[in-house]
Image (cartoon, rainbow, N blue to C red):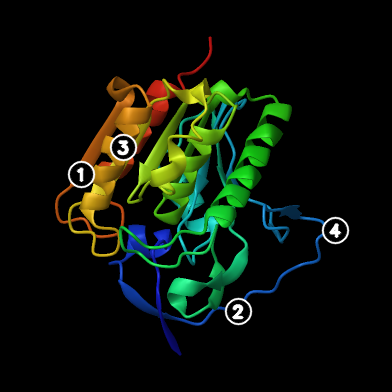
Amino acid sequence: MIKVINIGCPLLTLKFAFVDIVTVTVLISLVECEAPGTFMCGNNMSVPLPAIVPAARKATAAVIFLHGLGDSGHGWAEAMAGIRTPHVKYICPHAPVMPVTLNMNMAMPSWFDIIGLGPDAEEDESGIKKAAESIKALIDQEVKNGIPAHRIILGGFSQGGALSLYTALTTHQKLAGVVALSCWLPLRKSLSQSVISTNKDISVLQCHGEADPLVPLIFGRLSVEKLKTMLNPSNITFKSYASMPHSSCPEEMMDIKEFIEKQLPPLN
């Protein structure tokens, strides 16, 4: 039994009280790169195909939502099913398994390495950029499937939220919006030089718990202030929730639902 920091388990988040330091035993088998039912991630590792909540009718829009550290896409797929909009497809990919420095190099699902949680902690720049490329490839796949990029919202929780922000700011794909939950803005010191003008006017919903002990509220507030210097500030919304830890709550989920419905209205 090993004590590890878990910063993204939505099944615990939405159904049980979130535990800051949880005891986990992880047993994960990796499949061969050419195996059916897998796709390649930016770090050249294959992972299972995303968990998907299909649209109730013809899909004319999509939400791609990225889970947090140590989790999988299944929990957030269940959460999205609870707020689904009939014409929207929800795609919740799984991060590859890799050693995480923060957790004593224990291997677990992670979009990139996390070295520390402090504001001045070293960041895995190459890992973040590779992970962003894998998400851009997933967006491209949806475009090939018939859903244009401007009808796609990118979102995520914790580490997944950080990756969703970075990807949206550095992609040439014009997206419908970003949902960033309980997260931070990665590579913030150098990001201004990497921002591509395609999504300068993108709508952003950033949410954070006021009682978050793992990614403190100040991280979210500082991130949104930095975003306002790079994007159209009038399109950025920041919401905080009293007493909410590193977790989610029904009020937040309803705010997400309203944001999705506003940015991805049904087509006539």
- Label 3 or label 2, whichever comes before in sequence order: 2
- Label 3 or label 4, whichever comes before in sequence order: 4
Q: Which residue is mark 2?
A: 27
Q: Nearer the viewer, residue 35 or 254?
A: 35
Q: What's the amino acid at mark 3?
A: Lys
Structural distance between the alpha carbons of marks 1 and 4: 43 Å
Q: Which residue is mark 1?
A: 240
- Label 1 or label 3, whichever comes before in sequence order: 3
- Quarter of the picture containing the N terminus is bottom left
Give the number of the disc on residue 226.
Answer: 3
Structural distance between the alpha carbons of marks 3 and 4: 41 Å
Structural distance between the alpha carbons of marks 1 and 2: 35 Å
Residue 128 lies left or right of residue 222; in this view the side is: right
Q: Residues within 10 Å of mark 3 (few under 14, many from 20)?
A: some
Q: Which residue is mark 4?
A: 34
The residue sitting at the left extreme is 242
Q: Nearer the viewer, mark 1 or mark 3?
A: 3
The residue sitting at the top extreme is 268
Q: What's the amino acid at mark 4?
A: Glu
- CB-based contact (under 8 Å), mark 4 and mark 2: no
